Image (cartoon, rainbow, N blue to C red):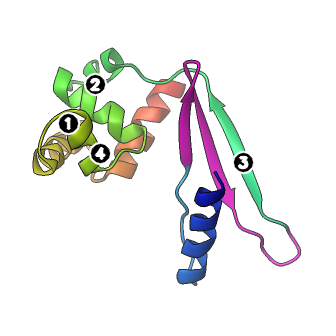
Amino acid sequence: MERWVASQQAHLVEHTELALTRQLTAQLDGQRIVLRYLPDQGAHPGAIIVDEERRSARRRDYESLGLSPREAEITEQAVLGAGNAAIADQLHMAPGTAKKHLDNIYGKLGVRSRGQATAFVLHLVDS
């Protein structure tokens, strides 16, 4: 966690304009823990916000969106924050294949990016 905080602080130093930091996620006893870093601003100290997400989407939830079982696996990994290389490694495929699957997933979900796909899926799960 210390490395994550340091990387968030370094990212903010490099980007003087408004920059989004990366959240840190972990699975613990079937729950998803999400940490978000808020930098200090003037007199206001920074903070780390911890969210517990009690229910994470399951593959069948993704399949109900019209995704194939393989696309559901890839979406599950992407929503957890895995990049193309990590998805490819986890699911034993080439990174280019993971990217192509993600492009197809974006089309099926009607979104244009990993972030939009993640927001879309997590919104449906929370509903």
Rate crowding at label 2 as few (under 14), some (14 to 19) or many (20 or more) other CA atoms within 10 Å. some
Q: Which of the marked residues, 1 or 3, is nearer the chain's N terminus?
A: 3
From the viewer's side, name the closer residue of 67 and 95.
Answer: 95
Q: Which of the marked residues, 1 or 2, is nearer the chain's N terminus?
A: 2
Amino acid type of the residue tagged 4 in the rendering? Ala
Q: Which of the marked residues, 4 or 2, is nearer the chain's N terminus?
A: 2
Give yes or no for residue 42 being in the magenta stretch: yes
**Viewed as shown, does residue 100 lie left or right of 4?**
left
Quarter-wise, where is residue 59 in the image?
top left
Residue 7 position, x and y percent, is 56, 66
Residue matched to label 3: 49
Measure the C-alpha gap from mark 4 to mark 2: 23 Å
Residue matched to label 4: 86
Secondary structure under tag 3 reads strand
* Magenta-highlighted residues: 24-44
Residue 52 position, x and y percent, is 65, 31
Measure the C-alpha gap from mark 1 to mark 4: 22 Å
Callout 1 touching callout 2 (CB < 8 Å): yes
Q: Which of the marked residues, 1 or 4, is nearer the chain's N terminus?
A: 4
Callout 1 touching callout 4 (CB < 8 Å): no
Measure the C-alpha gap from mark 2 to mark 3: 30 Å
Secondary structure under tag 2 reads loop
Residue matched to label 1: 108
Amino acid type of the residue tagged 1 in the rendering? Lys
Residue 70 position, x and y percent, is 17, 26
Callout 1 touching callout 3 (CB < 8 Å): no
**Viewed as shown, does residue 86 lie left or right of 108?**
right
